[in-house]
Image (cartoon, grey):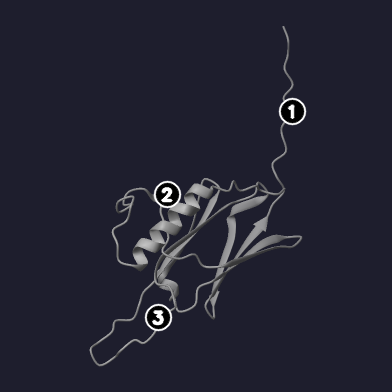
Amino acid sequence: MNTITRWNPISEFEDLLDRYHRHFGLPRQNGDNEGRDLFKRSDWIPPVDIQENADSFEIHAELPGIPKENVKVTVHEGVLSIQGERQQEETTEDNKQHRVERVYGSFLRRFTLPDNVSEEGINARFRDGVLTLTLRKVEPAQPKSIEVDVA
């Protein structure tokens, strides 16, 4: 069963504006976003590949330079969340930076789990900067037929 994700162009535009303001050190348009975890913004979005085989789905997330202690994977009400933070190395007066192209800060990716995935059957591996999540498939629950006696 394929899951359809609704595209929200306004949200993407707001994300773009937030990144623009952060890049130039300007205050955010929507405040500090604290306490709004459902609509939490990310400083960057790690790329992912999602593959399916007969027994499972696999999500591969690129997280280079991030220690596994800074990555958190959770499942809540059928939504898988991958979140964490890439911290920038501190600079000193002796260490000049000529170019900074990598993006630093927090990230959050969320995926709605299909009905045929067990929340308990999720395994995680983290190696060489790639987080691999294996989501085991299960048989979807079949509707039960209940016989009703009419008096």
Location of mark 2 (residue): 39
Q: Quick one: quadrant of the C terminus?
A: top right
Location of mark 1 (residue): 145
Q: At 25% across and 93% down in the image, what residue appears?
A: 94
Q: At 30% across and 66% down in the image, what residue appears?
A: 25
What's the residue type where badge 3 is placed? Val
Indicate whether 57 appears above or below 102.
above
Instruction: Name the disc covering residue 100, or none.
Output: 3
Instruction: Name the disc covering residue 59, or none.
Output: none
What's the residue type where badge 1 is placed? Ser
Q: At 43% across and 73% down in the image, what residue appears?
A: 103
| Residue situated in front as seen by the camera: 142 or 72 | 72
Quarter of image, res 65: bottom left
Residue 35 appears at what percent x and percent y?
A: 32, 49
- Dot 2: element: helix
Q: First in sequence: mark 3 or mark 2?
A: 2
